[in-house]
Image (tube, rainbow, N blue to C red):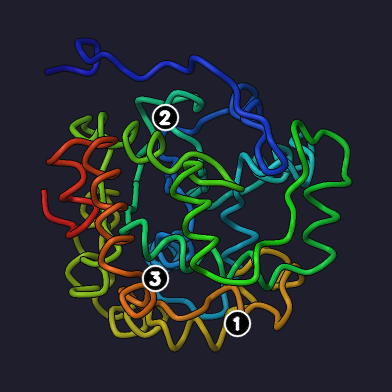
Amino acid sequence: MTPSQITWPVKTRELHSHHFDSTIWNDFKFRDDDIIIATYAKAGTTWLQQIISQLIFKGKGELAVAEMSPWMDLRVPPKEIKLEEIEQQTHRRFLKTHLPVDALVFSPSAKYLYIGRDGRDVVWSLYNHHRNANDLWYQALNETPGRVGPPISPPPGNREEYFHDWLEKDGYPFWSFWENIRTWWEIRNLPNVKLLHFSNLKADMPGEIRRIADFLDIPIDEGSWDNIIEHCSFDYMKENAIESVPLGGAFWDGGATTFINKGTNGRWQEILSDKESAAYEKRALSELGPECSEWLLTGEK
């Protein structure tokens, strides 16, 4: 099938909140080699940004990845500032979004990488992210001009209550989990879209990196391979978190290393009951269907 025969996604709505301003994509000028990193949140986004930076810059250390790869639809700083900074970039651009597909302007020429993760792991990481946010984080999201809808408030004191709110209210207090997964799953067969899974990266990071490089048409410099692998390891990213985390971690108590927390799966198993876990799996099946929910659980499709 040629590109002209493909039905490409079309933007049908805008998303605004304490976090989102999706209108930035309406004014963004794509380049043919742009890379878009997409995810719900806390599913390996920063890890994937690091991997792509290492492929583009051939294993170079101490890269300002968070600055190079901004979160496009985060409404701070204002889109006018962000768009100008991105337009000035001369390297191959790799940008981040947390939007569902139908709130995103989609380019047939760009390459899209979507990374998924079991929602029970996502929400555990999200809780740590939210619980350690400081006054500067709340000020940026709640008090700067342009916020639409209610402010975001501090989380409850325990993970179990946080999990129940997030599951029962579909992503509360952030954004819908299920529609994000579902919309990207629906376009998984487009030639410029590749689905990844956190568990697969954990199990075989070198193999996944090579597959990512092949998808992005980036030749691997074998002389830099050992550096690429080292710089994409959890230990390296934790030790050098200031480069990977927005504003060097200024929004979180404990700084950048708080943002890059554990990098592990399955911590929810020690806290959630069998009944709670089953409730999540039942919801996943009803929202996503058997094939997609199995992929989200295991990474297999």
Amino acid carrying label 2: it is: Val
What residue do we see at 60% from left, 67% from top?
A: 129
> Can residue 209 be seen from the camera position used here?
no
Per the image, the residue denoted by label 2 is 101
Q: Is residue 186 left or right of residue 34?
A: left
Please state the horizontal and vertical placement of residue 196, each as a whole percent of the image.
26, 54
Query: Could you tell me residue 13's position as x and y percent?
Result: 54, 18
Residue on which the image places disc 3: 58
Q: Residue at x 47, y 42 (%)?
A: 170
At horizontal 53% and vertical 76% (from top left) the residue drawn is: 260
Left or right of residue 50, residue 279 in this image:
left
- Can residue 149 be seen from the camera position used here? yes
Seen in the picture, residue 276 relative to 181 is either above or below; the reply is below
Which of the two discs, 3 and 2, sits closer to the camera? 2
Residue 257 — which label?
1
Foreground disc of the pair 1, 3: 1
Q: Position of residue 112 (x, y in %)?
A: 36, 41
Residue 94 in the figure: left or right of residue 14: left
Which quadrant, please, contains the N terminus? top left
Residue type indicated by callout 1: Thr
Query: Hey, what amino acid is under mark 3?
Result: Lys
> Could you say whether the residue bearing mark 1 is in a helix, strand or loop?
helix
Q: CA distance from mark 3 to mark 2?
A: 30 Å
Give the mark nearer the N terminus: 1 vs 2: 2
